[in-house]
Image (cartoon, rainbow, N blue to C red):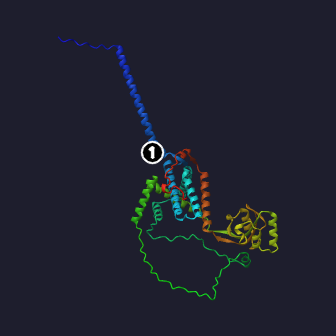
């Protein structure tokens, strides 16, 4: 007869121990799961924050319009790339023309200044941020004026940048201003210092033999057509390089081009009323440092002394000393304010002002001529830029602008100088 198996007796104490072990195991599992969730969550949030949240955070807000971190960082990288291109071009010129010690020093200083911009990322970042703030204000003004940039505008700009003109190469606009030659009366003619005309003298005994030029056949030039296909290939290659080097795709690049074109159009609209002509004076001046000398010169002029000779004798202005104090045609904005007031108040050619205190001395001014003249290209462009700058300053003062300080921690430091041109020319 088989022995009966003994039945294991489970006591309450045993059950309590088992329950305690199950709770401990469960708590350990829960702790492990919590730790895993926290670690994975932290990693996931870090990735989410870096790739999604931070890029859409604003670095600045202009009239409730956000400038996102992503867009700003793209523009900073684009600006740094432009600085690098400037450095490389200067470096190449230094290699080609830097053999002269003076020229070499000039190029080296230029390279150091350009490199310093890249070494200070916050400066570039701040400049780009201010430009993008201006872009928002410019866009608002463009909307008010009905100004916009089309896809065709961007396409035409890119074609011009790549030298592709399907409808023919445009004739460049001359930069030199139209020369206005004043009609001078005898009084004015006596005041100007004529430029001597050099007439070469050939001795009578000299026989001049003019050689017969050798006829050199003119080569026939066969132009290589720049086709639409070649342009598209070059454009794609350039855009691919931009995307590879500074992570800017074509859409973002087009936005940059659009902002630049919109700025130009709005500037033209804002400054459309600036005239190409302006009231100007042609004067001579003597600059001294003390009142006694100034009064003495005025008395000498009244007694009939020649202004040019007195200028050569007394003036401290070395730039005009050799030509009798003649400073040529000037607009009011190009002169010391006190000097301009006196010069434009003179009525007739030959009139002399009372001694006038300016920023660099005491001036005695003589009027040669006074008329409305065409501005030089430089003067006109300076007036356009100044008016547009003043407009931007006023717009920003009236706008609600908030800049978030964390932008300083997000400034890109890429791209950097290529290793082959990282050092200035010795």
Q: Residue at x 73, y 75 (%)?
A: 191
- Rate crowding at label 1 as few (under 14), some (14 to 19) or many (20 or more) other CA atoms within 10 Å: few
If the image is split into quadrants, where does the C terminus sit? bottom right
- Splitting the image into 4 quarters, where does residue 48 fall? top left
**Element type at marker 1?**
helix
Pointer 1: what residue?
51
Q: Position of residue 155 (x, y in %)?
A: 45, 62
Q: Nearer the viewer, residue 330 or 77?
A: 77
Residue placed farthest to the left in the image?
Answer: 1
Q: Position of residue 124 (x, y in %)?
A: 55, 52
87 to 403, vertically: above or below: below
6 on left or right of 391: left
Image-quadrant location for residue 105 = bottom right
Q: Is residue 191 above or below residue 160?
A: below
- Looking at the image, residue 138 sits to the left or right of residue 238; the answer is right
Residue placed most toward the observer, 30 or 277: 30
Pinpoint residue 228: horizontal percent, then vertical percent. 40, 66
Instruction: Please state, as top left, top right, bottom left or bottom right, where the N terminus lies in the image.
Output: top left
Q: Percent position (x, y) of residue 243?
A: 44, 54
Q: Is residue 248 visible?
A: no
């Amino acid at each position: 007869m088989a022995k009966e198996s003994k039945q294991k007796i489970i006591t309450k104490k045993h059950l309590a121990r088992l329950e305690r072990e199950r709770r401990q195991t469960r708590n350990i599992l829960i702790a492990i799961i919590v730790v895993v969730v926290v670690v994975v969550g932290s990693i996931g949030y870090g990735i989410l924050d870096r790739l999604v949240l931070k890029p859409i955070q604003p670095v600045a807000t202009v009239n409730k319009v956000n400038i996102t971190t992503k867009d700003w960082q793209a523009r900073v990288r684009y600006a740094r790339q432009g600085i690098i291109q400037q450095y490389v071009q200067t470096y190449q010129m230094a290699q080609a023309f830097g053999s002269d010690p003076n020229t070499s020093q000039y190029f080296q200083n230029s390279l150091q200044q350009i490199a310093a911009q890249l070494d200070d990322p916050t400066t570039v970042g701040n400049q780009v941020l201010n430009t993008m703030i201006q872009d928002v204000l410019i866009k608002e003004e463009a909307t008010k004026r009905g100004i916009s940039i089309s896809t065709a505008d961007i396409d035409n700009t890119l074609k011009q940048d790549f030298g592709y003109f399907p409808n023919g190469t445009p004739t460049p606009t001359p930069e030199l201003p139209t020369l206005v030659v004043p009609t001078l009366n005898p009084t004015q003619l006596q005041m100007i210092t004529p430029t001597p005309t050099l007439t070469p003298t050939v001795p009578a005994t000299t026989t001049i033999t003019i050689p017969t030029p050798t006829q050199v056949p003119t080569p026939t030039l066969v132009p290589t057509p720049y086709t639409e296909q070649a342009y598209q290939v070059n454009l794609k290659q350039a855009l691919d390089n931009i995307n590879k080097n500074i992570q800017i795709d074509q859409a973002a690049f087009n936005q940059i081009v659009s902002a630049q074109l919109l700025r130009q159009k709005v500037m033209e609209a804002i400054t459309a009323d600036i005239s190409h002509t302006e009231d100007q004076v042609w004067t001579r001046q003597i600059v001294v440092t003390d009142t006694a000398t100034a009064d003495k010169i005025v008395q000498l002029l009244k007694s009939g002394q020649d202004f040019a000779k007195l200028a050569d004798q007394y003036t401290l202005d070395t730039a005009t000393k050799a030509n009798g104090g003649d400073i040529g045609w000037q607009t009011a904005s190009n002169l010391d304010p006190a000097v301009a007031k006196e010069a434009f108040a003179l009525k007739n050619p030959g009139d002399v002002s009372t001694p006038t205190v300016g920023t660099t001395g005491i001036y005695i001014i003589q009027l040669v001529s006074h008329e409305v003249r065409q501005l030089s290209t430089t003067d006109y462009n300076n007036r356009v830029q100044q008016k547009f700058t003043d407009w931007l300053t006023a717009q920003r003062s009236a706008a609600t602008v908030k800049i978030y300080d964390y932008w300083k921690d997000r400034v890109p430091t890429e791209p950097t100088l290529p290793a082959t041109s990282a050092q200035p020319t010795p």
